[in-house]
Image (spheres, helix red, strand yellow):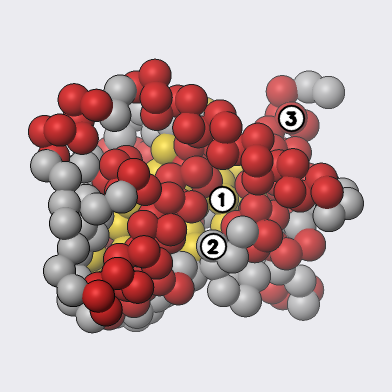
Amino acid sequence: MDKKEGIKQKLATANRILVNENLTELGRGHVCYKLEEDRIMIPGHLHDFQRSIADITASDMVVIDYEGNVVEGPYPESMHEFWFYIEAFKMRSELKAALHTHAFYANLLAMSGQTLKFSSRDTFPFVDGVPVFDGLPLFVNTQEMGHKMAQKLGKSRAIIHRGHGAFVVGESIEEAVITAAALERAAKKQVMASSLGSLLEYSRDDIIRTNTEEIRMEVIDIDWGYFVTRLEKRGVQI
């Protein structure tokens, strides 16, 4: 299997994980990968064919340029909302992957005006915060909107589009997916724990000191393996 085919397989797996782990609603959302400057691999626009990422395969991937044009693949259009990905990749050269989910609990936080609190290990990837973007429409359909969101993201690993969902970035496909899963778990815990009273928090300095790069990479590797195994046990064919 050549490198590009391997990326297609991993992207299909990543998109299936979003659905399998309840990280998104109604099979919506997508994961993409920056192949090189001005080239992004992303699912084709399956919704035009009454399909979603719930049944995506490697053959459903397309390659787009930084104008959003499909330059390779079996679909005339890619999944939409790629403008955030393009602008984030332009601003942060270290990024290789990004995704969008209709994340239920993360969206609840933004809708209620709450910010993510450093109360559990799931919040540790977000020491630079999780900004909230509140622009309309609730669909990132222009380059200008994507640019504004990428600016708002700053150095963070995720941003919530209030009333819509979450956008997450990473230096690998695995990191983006595991970070999205951590965000949704952290938000769920906060929503539920808030009913019991005020949340106790760890300090940002303590998180940075103890959550080392070695630990972070180990968590990504372990969690990715867990998610992939759960797909395999369901007999999912990518």
Q: Is residue 68 or residue 119 the one in the foreground? A: 119
Q: Is residue 145 or residue 54 the one in the foreground? A: 54
- In the picture of the structure, the residue carrying the numbered disc 1 is 31
Q: Is residue 97 left or right of residue 13?
A: left
Q: Amino acid at mark 1?
A: Val
Q: Residue 66: give x, y in percent of width and height.
A: 46, 45
Residue 21 visible in the picture = yes
* Disc 2 versus disc 3: nearer the observer: 2
Q: Is residue 168 left or right of residue 11?
A: left
Residue at the front extreme, as displayed:
196
The relative height of residue 190 versus residue 157 in the rendered view (above or below) is below
Numbered badge on residue 108: none
Q: Is residue 235 or residue 157 the one in the foreground? A: 235
The relative height of residue 207 versus residue 69 in the rendered view (above or below) is above
Q: Is residue 54 left or right of residue 108?
A: right
- In the picture of the structure, the residue carrying the numbered disc 3 is 6
Q: Residue at x 56, y 39 (%)?
A: 223
SS of the residue under disc 3: helix
Disc 2 to disc 3, C-alpha distance: 23 Å
Q: Earlier in the sequence, mark 1 or mark 3?
A: 3
Q: Is residue 9 or residue 226 the one in the foreground? A: 226
Q: Are marks 1 and 3 in contact (CB under 8 Å)?
A: no
Classify residue 170 by image quadrant.
Answer: top left
Q: Amino acid at mark 3?
A: Gly
- In the picture of the structure, the residue carrying the numbered disc 2 is 23
User: Badge 1, how many Cα within 10 Å: few under 14, some, many 20+?
Assistant: many
Q: Residue at x 11, y 33 (%)?
A: 205
SS of the residue under disc 2: loop
Q: Are marks 1 and 2 in contact (CB under 8 Å)?
A: no
